[in-house]
Image (cartoon, helix red, strand yellow):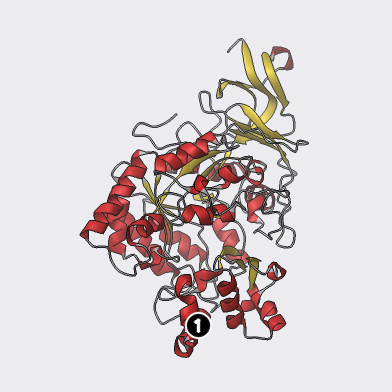
C-alpha cells in the first residue's frame, strides 16, 4: 500500500461492476487509479490519505458510462457537464445517430442543442483528431469518447444527395472514416431516420462499417424504424454487422407506436440471437428528437417551403406525415397522435411545453399544418413523443445485457438551456434505473450497476474502466441505495437526482453532495490499436 494515498473511501459496500455480489471494503486511490481494496476494514488500520470520504451506509460503484450521449459540443459550451456528473456518469460516448462535429457543419447544430452559438470559428475543426483535441483542451468534467458519424461523413462528400455514392465518393467516405479511426474514434454510427443517413443503402453502410471494423471499431446504429418497421430495421443493422465483420450496437431500444407495443420480448430475442449485437435503453416511455424526423425521405427541411407552396405536394406530405407511405421506412404520427407529441424548443417560445394538437387549436389550424408552421419557423424545432408503453420499457430495462444510456445533452438548471423543457432523461436516467428500477424489483442492484459499467466498458473498448479493481482507473460513484432516484419530470425536468453522494473522476472528487461546483478532471478517451488502460 502506498505510504500516503490521494483518496481513501472508508468502510463502504462495494458493487464492483462485474455483476458479482456486494462486499464490504475500503478503497484507496493513488495517481488516478485504485491502489488498494481492503476487505473487512478496521478503523484502526486506515492509512494516511490527503482526502477521505466516509462510505458508511453507502454503495461504491464504478463511474457510470453513458454510451449514447449527444454532448459532443457541450464541453465547448459548458464543460462542467452538471446534469451528467451529478447522475454519477464519468464517461460519455458522443458522435451518435450519425452526427459528429467533424467532418461537417453538424457542429453548429450540436452546439445549438447545448445552448451554444451556432456560428463562429470555434465550431470549425480541421480533422476528427482536432475536434477531440479541442474537447481535451476544454478540460471536461467527464471523460469523452467519440464515434464518427456516417451522416456527417456523407454530407461532406455528397451533400444531401438522394442517391448511392459513385466510386470516387465512396473512396472519399472510406478515407474519412479511416482517418477518424486512426485519430481515436471508437467506431461508426448511423442515424437512419435523419437526412442524409436515410438516403444510404445497406451496401453503402456495410462498406463504411467494414472500414471501422478493420481496426476494431464498433458499428452503432439508430435504426431506420422503431415502430411499424422496427424488426426490419433491426434486421438490417444485424446484417450490416455480419457483412462488415463488425460488432453491432443498437441505440435506444424501444417499441414505438401502437404498431410495436407489447413486442419488447420479441425485440430482445432478436438482438440476443445475433451473437455480435448489443443495445442500450433510456428508461422512459417517450422519445426526444427533431420534429423534422416526421418528414419522409423525399421532403427534407431544406425543401419544405417549396413543397408546402405546391398544393399537390402539400397534400401528399400531410398524408405521409400523418400515416406514412406504404412499406417505406418512415416515422409518422400514425399510432401515436398529435396530442402525444410535445414541443421541446422552437422559435415561438410560447409553444414550448405544449403538444401539437393544443398548438394547432390555439392557432386555429389542423395539427399537421401546425407541424409545418413550426418547422417553417424553425427547422431545428425539437419535440418529445410519448410513443412507448411502460410495460415494454420495463421489460427492456430488466434485461441484464442491455446497457443504460441517456440520449441527452448535458446541461444545468442555470445553464444556457435552463428555459428549455428538456427530456427528464437529461438529469435522471441512471438514478431512475438504480432507484425505482431496482427497488421495484425489475433487476438486482449488482445487475443494474453492471449494465452501466463493465458491460459498456468492455463493448466499447474502454479498458481499465467499468470495474472497482486494483489497478483500474478510479472513476467512482458513491450513492445511497435506499434514496437514489430521479426527480426530473416532463413538467419540471431541470432537477438533479437524489441519493448521489460523491463522484470521482480519475481520483479527483468531481462533485459531492452539498456542492454547487464541479471539478473538471475528465479527458478524451481515444481508441488505440493497443488498448488504452
**Quadrant assignment, res 232:** bottom left
Left or right: 500 in relation to 529: right
The residue positioned farthest toward the top in the image shown: 3
Is residue 195 toward the left or the right of residue 21 in the image?
Answer: left
Q: Secondary structure at mark 1?
A: helix
Q: What crowding class fits label 1: few (fewer than 14 Cα within 10 Å), some (14-19), or many (20 or more)?
A: some
Q: Nearer the viewer, residue 127 or 522?
A: 127
**Residue that sits furthest to the bottom in the current view:** 311
Q: In the rendered view, tell whether residue 23 sits above or below residue 391.
A: above
Q: Is residue 18 left or right of residue 511?
A: left
Q: Relative to 443, is 480 above or below? A: above
Percent across and percent down for residue 186 are 41, 43
Write the residue at 36% across / 52% down. Answer: 275
Residue furthest left as drawn: 167
- 257 or 193: nearer the viewer: 193
Determine which quarter of the picture holds residue 84: top right
Q: Which corner quadrant holds the C terminus? A: top left
Q: Position of residue 140 (x, y in %)?
A: 58, 37
Vertical side of 38 occupied by 189: above or below: below
| Residue bearing the label numbered 1 | 308
Which is more toward the observer, 297 or 424? 297
Determine the residue positioned at 62% across, 65% down: 390
- Residue 407 seen in this snapshot: no
Amino acid at each position: 500500500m502506498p505510504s500516503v494515498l490521494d483518496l481513501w473511501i472508508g468502510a463502504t459496500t462495494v458493487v464492483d461492476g462485474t455483476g458479482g455480489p456486494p462486499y464490504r471494503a475500503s478503497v484507496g486511490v493513488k495517481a488516478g487509479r485504485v491502489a488498494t481494496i481492503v476487505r473487512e476494514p478496521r478503523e484502526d488500520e486506515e492509512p494516511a490519505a490527503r482526502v477521505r470520504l466516509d462510505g458508511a451506509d453507502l454503495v461504491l460503484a464504478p463511474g457510470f458510462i453513458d454510451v449514447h450521449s449527444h454532448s459532443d459540443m457541450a464541453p465547448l459550451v459548458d464543460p462542467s457537464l452538471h446534469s451528467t456528473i451529478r447522475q454519477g456518469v464519468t464517461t460519455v460516448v458522443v458522435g451518435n445517430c450519425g452526427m459528429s462535429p467533424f467532418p461537417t457543419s453538424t457542429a453548429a447544430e450540436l452546439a445549438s442543442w447545448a445552448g451554444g452559438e451556432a456560428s463562429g470559428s470555434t465550431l470549425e475543426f480541421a480533422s476528427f483528431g482536432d475536434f477531440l483535441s479541442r474537447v481535451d483542451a476544454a478540460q471536461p468534467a467527464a471523460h469523452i469518447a467519440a464515434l464518427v458519424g456516417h451522416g456527417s461523413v456523407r454530407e461532406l462528400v455528397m451533400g444531401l444527395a438522394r442517391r448511392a455514392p459513385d466510386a470516387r465518393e465512396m473512396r472519399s467516405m472510406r478515407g474519412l472514416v479511416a482517418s477518424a479511426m486512426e485519430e481515436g474514434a471508437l467506431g461508426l454510427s448511423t442515424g437512419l431516420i435523419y437526412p442524409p443517413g436515410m438516403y444510404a443503402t445497406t451496401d453503402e453502410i456495410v462498406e463504411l462499417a467494414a472500414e471501422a471494423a478493420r481496426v476494431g471499431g464498433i458499428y452503432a446504429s439508430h435504426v431506420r424504424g422503431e415502430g411499424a418497421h422496427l424488426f426490419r430495421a433491426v434486421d438490417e443493422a444485424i446484417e450490416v454487422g455480419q457483412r462488415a465483420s463488425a460488432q453491432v450496437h443498437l441505440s435506444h431500444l424501444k417499441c414505438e407506436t401502437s404498431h410495436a407495443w407489447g413486442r419488447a420480448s420479441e425485440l430482445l430475442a432478436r438482438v440476443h440471437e445475433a451473437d455480435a449485437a448489443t443495445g442500450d435503453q433510456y428508461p422512459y416511455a417517450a422519445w426526444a428528437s427533431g420534429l423534422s424526423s416526421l418528414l419522409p425521405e423525399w421532403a427534407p427541411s431544406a425543401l419544405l417551403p417549396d413543397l408546402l407552396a405546391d398544393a399537390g405536394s402539400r397534400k401528399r406530405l400531410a398524408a405521409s406525415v400523418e400515416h406514412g407511405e406504404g412499406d417505406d421506412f418512415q416515422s409518422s404520427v400514425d399510432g401515436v397522435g398529435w396530442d402525444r407529441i410535445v414541443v421541446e424548443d422552437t422559435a415561438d417560445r410560447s409553444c414550448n411545453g405544449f403538444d401539437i394538437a393544443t398548438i394547432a387549436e390555439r392557432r386555429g389550424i389542423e395539427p399537421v399544418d401546425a407541424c409545418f408552421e413550426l418547422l417553417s419557423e424553425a427547422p431545428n424545432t425539437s419535440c418529445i413523443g410519448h410513443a412507448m408503453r411502460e410495460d415494454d420499457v420495463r421489460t427492456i430495462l430488466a434485461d441484464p445485457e442491455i446497457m443504460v444510456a441517456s440520449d441527452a445533452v448535458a446541461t444545468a438548471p442555470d445553464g444556457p438551456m435552463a428555459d428549455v423543457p428538456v427530456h427528464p432523461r437529461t438529469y435522471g436516467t441512471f438514478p431512475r434505473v438504480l432507484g425505482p428500477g431496482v427497488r421495484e424489483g425489475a433487476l438486482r442492484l449488482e445487475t443494474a450497476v453492471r449494465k452501466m459499467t463493465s458491460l459498456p466498458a468492455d463493448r466499447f473498448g474502454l479498458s481499465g474502466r467499468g470495474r472497482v479493481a486494483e489497478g483500474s482507473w478510479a472513476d467512482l460513484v458513491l450513492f445511497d441505495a435506499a434514496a437514489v432516484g430521479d426527480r426530473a419530470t416532463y413538467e419540471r425536468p431541470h432537477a438533479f437526482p437524489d441519493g448521489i453522494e460523491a463522484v470521482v473522476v480519475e481520483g479527483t472528487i468531481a462533485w459531492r453532495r452539498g456542492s454547487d461546483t464541479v471539478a473538471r478532471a475528465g479527458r478524451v478517451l481515444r481508441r488505440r490499436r493497443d488498448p488504452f488502460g
